[in-house]
Image (cartoon, rainbow, N blue to C red):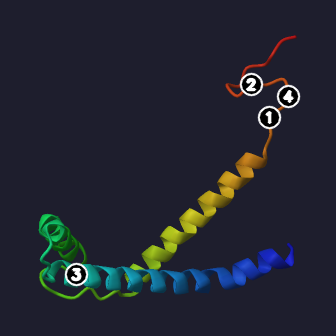
Amino acid sequence: MDVGEVLAVLYGPPLLLLLSAVSVLQLNFLVQALSAFAKSRGTTALWKAVQPALLQLTKTLDGAFRGSGKLFEPNANHLLLFALLLAVLVTGERLHAALKRIQPPPNVTSAGRVNKG
């Protein structure tokens, strides 16, 4: 086991939790900012055309993240689930990179058939 693997084992989980906390808080701020922006008043024709769709989007996001009028307050479950999501994404990326490095033998096609001749 080399030093990089040891450091990844030691510092990986706290780093994932820190990244998940930042990401969940950014999502919370984004939902709040979008809600405030959608409720602002505009006078241009473009704003009047876009505002109903933006209000519907904020209503959907409020219902999904905040519930019935409550503010979205991330707790430990949110952080752990987002850390798990980040871990799955990182592992999938590493697996994809490892599979790209594997080259098939020269006489085998991509479909798995052996070339004769």
Q: Which residue is mark 3?
A: 37
Q: Amino acid at mark 1?
A: Pro
Q: Which numbered disc, 2 or 1, marks the residue that appears first in the sequence?
A: 1
CB atoms at circles 2 and 1 under 8 Å apart? yes
User: Considering only vertical position in the picture, is 72 above or below 100?
Assistant: below
Q: Secondary structure at mark 1?
A: loop
Q: Which residue is mark 1?
A: 104
| Left or right of residue 72, residue 4 in this image | right
| Left or right of residue 74, residue 18 in this image | right
CA gap between label 1 and label 4 equals 6 Å
Q: Amino acid at mark 3?
A: Phe
CA gap between label 2 and label 4 equals 8 Å
The residue depicted at 45 percent of the width and 80 percent of the height is 23
CB atoms at circles 1 and 4 under 8 Å apart? yes
Q: Which numbered disc, 3 or 2, marks the residue that appears first in the sequence?
A: 3
Q: Which residue is mark 2?
A: 109
